[in-house]
């Protein structure tokens, strides 16, 4: 049998380690990770190997040659451009025999029993067998669902936490029959999990999954690289280390010199021809690469030194990685998670702060204090992007330097001469960062239409009207010390996840485009954008607005809505009392306490003025809070049902889009007027994507966010207000009367603290404890439907170490019992 070793990836997330070294050559222990893979293949009788190469291919070929030194025969299949996991194997087809073959990644450390996997494949008569394993955090891997016989039912590539319902993942190891390549197009990018396997499943071909025992670690990030080193030293993976045992857990390579006064703490590996000098302290979980020197009194712990590294006397390294031929001079200090690239020098007594990445061939001056990362600002995140853009504490996580580099990366993804619409909320921090963004975009040959301080929906509309991308800087909702940088596409929607990943990669590479002097972008300040926005809202539906005489109280929330309302209210013809129009940069967002106080005051004004309703805008004009004619604040879920009732009446039917965590009573409300409810995921992108259907009359998230078709702008509080008063004006009942006629909302929600490492096991445990219940995994999380129609939704949070549980029964008590039941199961799975 032949094997195909995939060795063409760039290893972007591992930079600067992989800036000038392909990921398969990264050392794990005493040898490159791909060498561990080749030893594994040979140990299972597979010595004829085809290696697919693309990025820095020459380095891989020069290192391994024809494989004779390792006792294997190597041939190489070259790619001019990345062809994907399946396209790479198709490209190597001429080098494969017309027989069963095995595919394995060249950058994963594993000791899986390949012989047993091959036996399983042949016993099942499979066309493809996918080797699977269980991992605590399945977010970065492809999920595979099997039936009771081991046959694959479904693949889900790179899931979100809301889609994780098992911890069994694809290792990227496949046993295949040659006929599978007939389903792979030649010369173009094709992936196994994303393209080929779904086609095979749809065609009924025998695709099986083998759940393998043993060790497996995909080396795709700095954390997983450190984990692989530690696991190898701990003996968790069956692979060898050259040299001899100086003491239990202390392995020393040939020609290494360890001074008698040096202190080595197991587990540790000292590579061949290395030197550890007097009173140096090395370990635990430290690998000292071939030819490296650890100077006297230096302390190196939980770190990896590649070959020919120098650590000077008295230096301190903690949980760091030093690339080839790099040097840390005497007295320097590297705090945890520092990565120093090849041929770089950290000067004497310099201090490099935790998480800093130093790219190859850089020099840190003597006694310098390096606090900002060269590439990665927030090491706690696998991706730069959070649920809504790039966010964090101002001048801690999100600094002017980050804003400049991020904007430069963004400009590099756009054509020269393109235009970006820029805006911010009214806070000083957001406005200052917006200035950084503008300058960086201009120097990247991008023109800027600067709306200055404006409502976010206004910026979205301008992006849509001008077919331009947009950037908006705002204070994070409810967090006065934090900011978010949001990216908007030319349709006015948030940047897609694929576009975010592309921007993340450019940012990580620091691959910025710089404009020549004649290419510097312009910066303009367009006029009458608010008037254009208000005119579009007033013209929704294409008919005269019927809300004249309706009395409302509007709370501008001390935010951007204060700039929009004067132009909008006059066009609507409503009788409005507007409060909190003073825009204060010291109040960029609202705390829960302040919001409650303002809503109480708003209710009092509604009652005293005998208004039909009151509304409160959030600071950037995205969300709306409703107060009825009795002065009572209406929660977000109830507001969505009220708006659904009114919109369905107005339109005489249609489709309403709601997230799966909302009450199923919405179906009853919709059915009264011939409308239907379309359920979708709880994410912003899922809701706005579903709302694009022309049949949709309204979309709501149950938290004050609405999408009103016809505006082209998602999550627009002014549009929601406009649509609400239009529908309410022709209704004889009061708002409170309409609300009283709605069915009860018995949905309850609870958060259960869940370590990141336990989230996959939690979702697997939930999915395996169904009994006679119906499992729904088609939208978001795992929704369990009881025989009586009550339901619970279990969903891991994408950005926090919690799992959210929603439950709805026939009564609040029934909902509470159901919530308690699943909270106990989730909590038990975290232990």
Image (cartoon, rainbow, N blue to C red):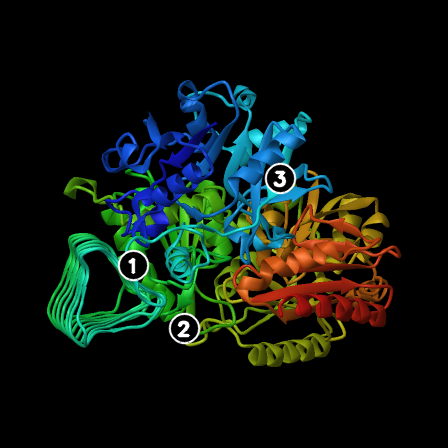
Q: CA distance from mark 3 to mark 1?
A: 39 Å
Label 2 neighbourhood size at 10 Å, few (<14), some (14-19), many (20+)? Answer: some
Residue 744 at what x, y percent from top left?
A: 83, 65
Secondary structure of the residue carrying tag 2 is loop
Placement of 828 over or under 287, stated as above or below: below
Which mark is nearer the camera, 3 or 1?
1
**x 50%, y 63%: residue:** 620
Can residue 288 be seen here? The reply is: no
Q: CA distance from mark 3 to mark 2?
A: 57 Å
Seen as rendered, the residue at the extreme right is 788
Q: CA distance from mark 2 to mark 1?
A: 66 Å
**x 71%, y 58%: residue:** 766
**x 41%, y 23%: residue:** 91
Which mark is nearer the camera, 2 or 1?
1
Placement of 26 over or under 184, stated as above or below: below
Label 1 neighbourhood size at 10 Å, few (<14), some (14-19), many (20+)? Answer: few
Which mark is nearer the camera, 3 or 2?
3
For the residue pair 813 and 621, the one nearer the viewer reads as 813
- Mark 3 or mark 2: which comes first in sequence? 3
Relative to 13, is 332 on the left or the right?
A: left
**x 26%, y 52%: residue:** 440
Name the residue tied to disc 2. Answer: 585
Relative to 824, is 463 on the left or the right?
A: left
- Mark 3 or mark 1: which comes first in sequence? 3
Residue 540 at what x, y percent from top left?
A: 62, 46
Placement of 804 over or under 204, stated as above or below: below
Name the residue tied to disc 1. Answer: 244
Relative to 438, is 666 on the left or the right?
A: right
Q: Residue 208: name its quadrant.
A: top right
Residue 350 at what x, y percent from top left?
A: 16, 71
Name the residue tied to disc 3. Answer: 209
């Amino acid at each position: 049998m032949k094997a195909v070793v995939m060795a063409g990836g760039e290893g972007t997330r591992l930079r600067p380690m992989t800036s000038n070294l392909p990921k398969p050559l990264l050392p794990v222990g005493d040898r490159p990770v791909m060498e561990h893979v080749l030893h594994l293949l040979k140990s299972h009788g597979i010595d004829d190997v085809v290696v697919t190469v693309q990025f820095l291919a020459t380095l891989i070929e020069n290192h391994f040659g024809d494989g004779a030194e390792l006792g294997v025969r190597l041939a190489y299949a070259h790619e001019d451009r990345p062809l994907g996991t399946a396209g790479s194997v198709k490209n190597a087809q001429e080098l494969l025999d017309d027989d069963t073959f095995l595919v394995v990644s060249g950058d994963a450390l594993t000791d899986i029993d390949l012989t047993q996997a091959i036996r399983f494949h042949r016993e099942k008569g499979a066309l493809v067998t996918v080797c699977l394993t269980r991992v605590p955090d399945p977010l970065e891997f492809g999920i595979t669902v099997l039936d009771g016989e081991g046959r694959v039912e479904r693949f889900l590539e790179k899931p979100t936490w809301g889609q994780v319902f098992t911890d069994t993942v694809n290792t990227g190891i496949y046993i295949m029959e040659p006929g599978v390549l007939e389903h792979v197009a030649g010369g173009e990018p094709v992936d196994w999990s994303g393209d080929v396997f779904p086609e095979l499943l749809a065609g009924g071909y025998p695709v099986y999954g083998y759940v393998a025992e043993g060790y497996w670690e995909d080396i795709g990030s700095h954390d997983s690289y450190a984990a692989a080193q530690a696991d190898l030293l701990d003996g968790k993976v069956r692979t060898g280390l050259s040299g001899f045992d100086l003491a239990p857990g202390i392995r020393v390579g040939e020609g290494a010199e360890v001074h008698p006064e040096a202190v080595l703490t197991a587990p540790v590996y000292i590579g061949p021809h290395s030197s550890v000098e007097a009173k140096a302290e090395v370990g635990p979980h430290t690998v000292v690469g071939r030819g490296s020197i650890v100077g006297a009194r230096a302390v190196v712990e939980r770190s990896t030194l590649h070959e020919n590294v120098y650590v000077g006397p008295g230096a301190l390294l903690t949980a760091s990685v030093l690339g080839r031929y790099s040097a840390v001079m005497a007295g320097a200090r590297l705090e945890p998670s520092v990565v120093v690239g090849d041929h770089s020098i950290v000067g004497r007594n310099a201090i490099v702060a935790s998480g800093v990445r130093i790219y190859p061939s850089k020099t840190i001056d003597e006694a310098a204090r390096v606090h900002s990362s060269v590439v990665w600002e927030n090491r706690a995140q696998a991706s730069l992007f959070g649920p809504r853009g790039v966010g964090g504490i101002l001048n801690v996580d999100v600094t002017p330097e980050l804003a400049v580099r991020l904007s430069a990366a963004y400009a590099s993804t756009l054509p020269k001469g393109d235009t970006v619409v820029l805006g911010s909320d009214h806070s000083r921090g957001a406005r200052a960062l917006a200035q950084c963004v503008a300058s960086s975009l201009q120097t990247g040959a991008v023109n800027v239409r600067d709306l200055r301080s404006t409502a976010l929906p206004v910026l979205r509309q301008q992006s849509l009207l001008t077919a331009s991308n947009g950037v908006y800087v705002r204070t994070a909702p409810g967090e006065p010390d934090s900011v978010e940088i949001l990216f908007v596409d030319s349709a006015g929607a948030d940047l897609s996840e694929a576009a975010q990943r592309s921007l993340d990669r450019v940012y990580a590479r620091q691959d910025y485009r710089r404009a020549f002097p004649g290419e510097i972008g312009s910066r303009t300040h367009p006029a009458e954008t608010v008037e254009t926005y208000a005119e579009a809202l007033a013209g929704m539906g294409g008919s005269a607005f019927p809300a004249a005489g309706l009395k409302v109280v509007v709370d501008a929330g001390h935010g951007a809505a204060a700039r929009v309302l004067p132009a909008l209210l006059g066009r609507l013809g409503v009788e409005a009392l507007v409060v909190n129009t003073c825009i204060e940069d010291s109040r960029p967002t609202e705390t829960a306490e302040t919001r409650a106080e303002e809503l109480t005051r708003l209710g009092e004004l509604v009652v005293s003025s005998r208004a039909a309703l009151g509304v409160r805008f959030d600071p950037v004009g995205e969300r709306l809070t409703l107060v009825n004619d009795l002065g009572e604040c209406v929660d977000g879920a109830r507001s969505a049902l009220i708006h659904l009732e009114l919109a369905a009446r107005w339109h005489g039917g249609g489709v309403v889009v709601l997230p799966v965590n909302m009450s199923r009573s919405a179906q009853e409300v919709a059915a009264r007027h011939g409308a239907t409810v379309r359920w979708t995921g709880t994410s912003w992108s899922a809701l706005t994507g579903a709302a694009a259907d022309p049949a949709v009359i309204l979309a709501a998230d149950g938290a004050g966010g609405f999408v009103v078709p016809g505006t082209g702008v998602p999550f627009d509080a002014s549009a929601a207000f406009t649509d609400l008063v239009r529908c309410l004006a022709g209704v004889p009942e009061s708002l409170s009367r309409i609300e009283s006629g709605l069915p009860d909302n018995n949905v309850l929600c609870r958060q259960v603290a869940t370590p990141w490492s336990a989230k996959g096991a939690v979702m697997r445990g939930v999915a395996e404890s169904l009994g006679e219940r119906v499992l729904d995994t088609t939208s978001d999380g795992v929704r369990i439907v009881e025989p009586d129609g009550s339901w619970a939704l279990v969903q891991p949070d994408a950005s926090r170490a919690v799992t959210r549980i929603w439950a709805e029964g026939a009564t609040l008590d029934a909902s509470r019992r159901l919530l308690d039941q699943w909270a106990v199961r989730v909590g038990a799975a975290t232990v």
